[in-house]
Amino acid sequence: MRPYFKLSGGGNDFLALVEPEPIPQPELIQAWCQRGLSLGADGLFHLERSQHGARMRYYNADGKPADLCLNGTRCAVRLAVHLGWADETIEIETGAGPILGRIEGPAAVELVLPVPGPPIETDLVVGDRHLHGWIVDVGVPHFVIEWPAGLSKAPIAELGPPIRSHPDFGAGGTNVDFVLFCERHLFEIRSFERGVETETLACGTGVLASAATGVHLGHLEPPIKARTLGGFLLKVGEAEDQNGSAGWTLTGDARILSHGNVTPEAEQLPRATQWSDPGVRKSDRAAS
């Protein structure tokens, strides 16, 4: 059995393995992240100590690696401090570069990040729809769509998958964010995340990409609050990075939910159900 932690960052939930535990094979990560059948999570990260702090390797629920997950990084900060690797501040090495994180209360973590590059305006054709949005790379790609009609009935399930895999975004695809800019310092967001392949309760990189879009369009200015599906507010502020350059912060809930052991049963999943076709007679099925 393997010891693991379960954490949640603003509604994104993660499994975490700590050194000296090895990194699981992709199919094992995929099995553990299955909801209802196993432990269930949006992704998994592996955390180990490094020369300057800690190093995290992040994997989406499909078992594939991703360079960056900001809610996951905030959880990595919380876990590293919990393990006694730092007092309140620690540098986390990610696939997108080092990120400074610090504890900001009993269940909140702040990250100091580079200011995102300018969003790129683009149009997509999805079926019979013509969609206007902005491409923003914040370590992972996002496509931000302003949805002024409100997010309660935004077509996340309908449009999320075809946008995520749209050929304009190449083989890797993109994350998709539907956004309503409410006030000068507030917006609402719903995100469809690649690698999870569904809407999640929050997306830290999506909040950063959408805030950058709002500032670019003149709709927002820091400090900014983002209202997410999970009910938490994520906050984007201004700060100096470790080199004294202008940066942004991302602050929000990050909590340790449980600590236990993964049993072998967590990877023993059933095959996907193959439903019977009522139009095929039983004798025909037997013959085939």
Image (cartoon, rainbow, N blue to C red):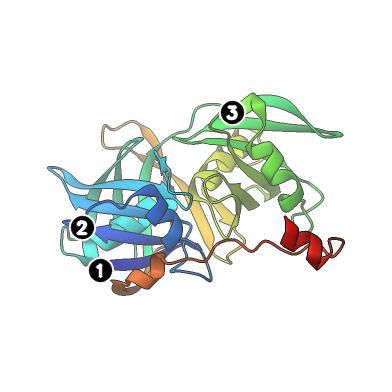
Crowding around mark 2 (Cα neighbors within 10 Å: few <14, some 14 to 19, many 20+) is few
Residue 206 seen by the camera: yes
What residue is at 64 percent from the left and 44 percent from the top? 177
Q: CA distance from mark 2 to mark 3?
A: 39 Å
Which residue lies under the disc numbered 3?
119
Depth check: 104 or 10 in front? Answer: 10
Q: CA distance from mark 1 to mark 2?
A: 8 Å
What residue is at 63 percent from the left and 36 percent from the top? 143
Give the farthest residue toward the left.
51
Residue 75 in the image: state x and y as whole percent.
35, 58
Amino acid type, mark 2: Glu
Reading the chain from its start, which is encountered first: label 3 or label 1? Answer: 1
Numbered label attached to residue 3? 1
Q: Quadrant of residue 265?
A: bottom left
Reading the chain from its start, which is encountered first: label 1 or label 2? Answer: 1
Determine whether the residue tagged by mark 3 lies in a helix, strand or loop: loop
- Foreground disc of the pair 2, 3: 2
